[in-house]
Image (cartoon, grey):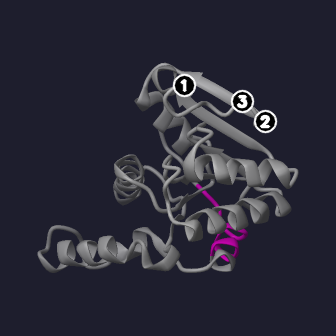
Amino acid sequence: MTKSVTVYCSSSNNSPKEYFDAATELGKGLAERDISLIFGGGNVGLMGCIANAVMQSGGTVRGIIPRFLEEKEIAHYGITELHIVETMHERKMKLAGWADAFIVLPGGFGTLDELIEVITWRQLGHHEKPILLFNIDGFWNPLISFFDKLADSQLVKPDHHKLYKVCNRVDEIYEVVSTCGTRWTE
């Protein structure tokens, strides 16, 4: 059973309202299901939004932020635990290692970096944790098409889609995370 999920998402305050609404809905639902949120530790953008929704609904939130981003991303001191680390690598390892599953909301280059890394690690057998693309308003459709192009070009296996699941609604996410088991190897 899933006890915690890592959510990768935008730190931008300029995202569309629909993204913030979906992050709030997801955060409330995680708290209601007693699933802890693990995230990048920022108090801005979708990161701050989902953390606030979990906290306001009585849930648990663990943030991990590198010291050099503590001020830039405005570290979220109003959560259950905030871990200040020295490097991005340390942050990413904790975000990945502490999670039972990954949920990826819309985001920019940092979110893409984190997504591709956990997909690659899963492909290599480093973990078997579910990776869920929360496809709010079709946000991930161009990337999914690109992944298909990689397969068509024989750069990735034809069954690459087994590495992740596309979820268009919050209830699809809850269905997966409520039943998943995990394995993480060092």
Q: Residue at x 22, y 68 (%)?
A: 156
Identify the element where label 3 is drawn: loop
Q: Amino acid at mark 2?
A: Thr
Q: Amino acid at mark 1?
A: Glu
Which class describes the residues within 10 Å of circle 3: few (<14), some (14-19), or many (20+)? Answer: few
Measure the alpha-carbon separation of dots 3 and 1.
Answer: 10 Å
Measure the alpha-carbon separation of dots 1 and 2.
Answer: 16 Å
Q: Which residue is mark 1?
A: 70
Q: Mark on residue 77?
A: 3
Q: Relative to 177, is 127 above or below? A: above
Foreground: 150 or 113?
Answer: 113
* Quadrant including the N terminus: bottom right
Q: Mark on residue 80?
A: 2
Left or right of 100? Residue 133 is: left
- The location of residue 161, given as percent across then percent down, is 37, 76
**Is residue 98 shown in magenta?**
no
Which residue is most to the left?
153
Foreground: 92 or 128?
Answer: 92
Q: Are marks 1 and 2 in contact (CB under 8 Å)?
A: no
Is residue 22 in sight in this rendering? yes
Q: Which residues are magenta?
A: 173-182
- The location of residue 147, given as percent across then percent down, is 27, 72
Please tell me which of labels 1 and 2 falls first in the chain. Answer: 1
**Is residue 178 shown in magenta?**
yes
Left or right of 170? Residue 32 is: right
